[in-house]
Image (spheres, helix red, strand yellow):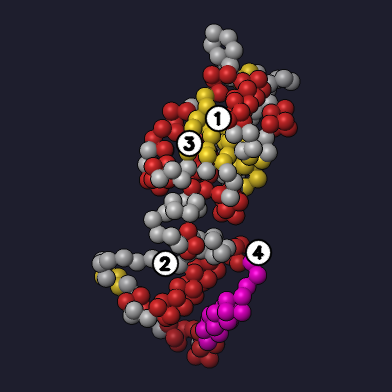
Amino acid sequence: MNFNVLTIFPEMFVPFWEHGIVKKAIDRNLISVSTINIRDFAKGKHRVTDDRPYGGGSGMVVKPEPLANAIRAAKKTSPSLRTILLTPQGCSFSQKKARELAAEKGLILVCGRYEGVDERICHDFVDDEISIGDYVLTGGELASMIIIDAVVRLIPGALGNADSADNDSFSDSLLAHAQYTRPRTFEGEEVPEVLLSGNHQQIEEWRFEESLIRTFLKRQDLLKERLLSEREIEILKKWCRDIEKIIHAQSVFGSDTLSGNK
Ligand code: 6GU
């Protein structure tokens, strides 16, 4: 897969290409990366890439000509690539979107600046607008890196373990289960017994329940937008019954009796 980033700060990407899974993916020829400096397509002695907004107001707007020419240059080498503008006005990036993008042959990622790019670029040169969340960054560079990072790890062969991406949080609209590694006791806290049992079916069941309940406790919004399986409904009902038992005990004995409160 080919990532072509259009930016006025290409140097920001140099360390990004040189670390971790992204570097490995480049070394293994799973991805190729390049940056185009938008400034190289700007005219005049000062190669200006932004200008004051028509109609007045604060801030600067990215000029259309250098950006259009930079996008044209990127498309020349790879005409069919999807062109994405990084902007806080785009649709929210998600794991689903990452999976969708990972199926592309490549991406042209256009890093906007925070006051925006000339609207005519959005109309004529961009296939998709993506935001990484509801807050404003000074530019799309970090957003580009986040998207590339999330997409690269989904490319087959990018992660060491072939199925690591299948167990990710969000891969099934659930958060991932808790993970533990050695030592067995850390500062007085033990690893859950079941994980030491060697019983793979029990471990799988524990992880499944843990993942579901964790999602319920931390991100109920994810469960609400999801069709629950029978197995999941059973687990949630079991938790309901357990909670009801506790409440019932309180009402029978009185909460003060149980807690020892006077
Ligand atoms: Cl993609 N760009 C900028 N400038 N700000 C953002 C963003 C992108 N996503 C969230 N905030």
- Tell me where residue 125 appears, x and y as whole percent: 68, 31
**Which residue: 52% across, 84% down?**
242
Q: Which quadrant of the figure has residue 90?
A: top right
Label annotation for residue 42: none
- SS under mark 3: strand
> Which residue is labeled 1 in the image?
6
Please state which amino acid type lies under the numbered disc 4: Glu
In the image, is 130 to the left or to the right of 21?
Answer: right
Crowdedness of circle 4 by 10 Å Cα count: few (<14), some, many (20+)? few
- Marks 3, 1: nearer the viewer: 3
> Which residue is labeled 2 in the image?
178
Q: Is mark 4 within 8 Å of ligand 1?
A: no
117 or 190, which lies in front?
117
- Tell me where residue 7 appears, x and y as whole percent: 53, 28
Specify the segment rendered in magenta: 224-245
Residue 94 in view (yes/no) = no
**Which residue: 52% across, 48% down?**
151
95 or 106, which lies in front?
106
Residues at marks 2 and 1, CA–CA distance in whole angstroms: 38 Å
125 over 20 or under it: above or below: above
- Marks 3, 2: nearer the viewer: 3
Question: Any magenta on residue 236?
Answer: yes
- SS under mark 4: loop
> Which residue is labeled 4 in the image?
225
Residue 174 in view (yes/no) = yes
- Tell me where residue 183 appears, x and y as whole percent: 25, 67
Q: Which residue is farthest bottom?
A: 252
> Which residue is labeled 3 in the image?
33
